[in-house]
Image (cartoon, rainbow, N blue to C red):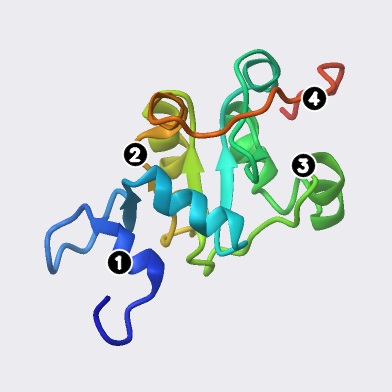
Amino acid sequence: MPVGATALEVIAESIFKKGEKKRRSSLVVHSPQALKSLVDRNKVLLIDVRNRTELNEKGQIPGSVCLPLHEVDAAFDGGRVSDQEFLERYGFPRPGPRREDVVLTCRSGRRVWAADRLLRRRGYERLRIYSGSFRDWVRRGGETFLADYDLDYDILN
């Protein structure tokens, strides 16, 4: 490990060119083993943007939290959802835009880029993307569990 580098910097790779002003996202996490280690040590907040039904039926990565893509924009709008409402609805405090330990995941990798775009518009410039997403996690033998989310909830508009 290079002197002064964090574990996340070592396991992540930049996805933009040096000097590029606009970035799609700051870093991509490639290794499920490294991600598991970071989640196990509470070094990252792993947000799964799949629907609750998918997590109930297909499974969820241990240590991840659920915030469905269709709720991301409204959930991160402080004028529509207070910090207390966010905590009650999702079970974790809304992360601030300066946090560097937020990693997004989904089933195959498409929805994370949509969530990344939505959050970047709200000032979240330091997000990470788990490039393999749930499919790769399972394919590589990653542990999962079937979630038990209540599907009777009000959709954020």
| Nearer the observer, 38 or 72 | 38
Residue designated by label 3? 90
Residue designated by label 4? 149
- Whether tag 4 and tag 2 are in contact, CB under 8 A, the answer is no
| Nearer the observer, 152 or 41 | 41
- Position in image of residue 145 (x %, y %): 67, 27
Which image quarter holds the C terminus? top right
Distance Cα–Cα, label 4 vs label 1: 34 Å
Per the image, label 4 sits on a secondary structure element best described as: loop
Mark 4 vs mark 1: which is more N-terminal?
Answer: 1
Q: Amino acid at mark 1?
A: Val
Residue designated by label 1? 10
Mark 3 vs mark 1: which is more N-terminal?
Answer: 1
Mark 2 vs mark 3: which is more N-terminal?
Answer: 3
Q: Residues within 10 Å of mark 4 (few under 14, many from 20)?
A: some
Res. 140 visible in picture: yes
Image-based side of 72 in relation to 98, left or right:
right
Residue designated by label 2? 131
- Position in image of residue 103 (x %, y %): 49, 50
Per the image, label 3 sits on a secondary structure element best described as: helix
Per the image, label 2 sits on a secondary structure element best described as: loop
Image-based side of 24 in relation to 59, left or right:
left
3 vs 1, front mark = 1
Image point (32%, 59%), residue name: 11
2 vs 1, front mark = 1
Q: Amino acid at mark 2?
A: Ser
> Relative to 130, is 18 above or below?
below
> Relative to 82, is 74 above or below?
above
Res. 128 visible in picture: no
Which image quarter holds the N terminus? bottom left
Distance Cα–Cα, label 3 vs label 4: 11 Å
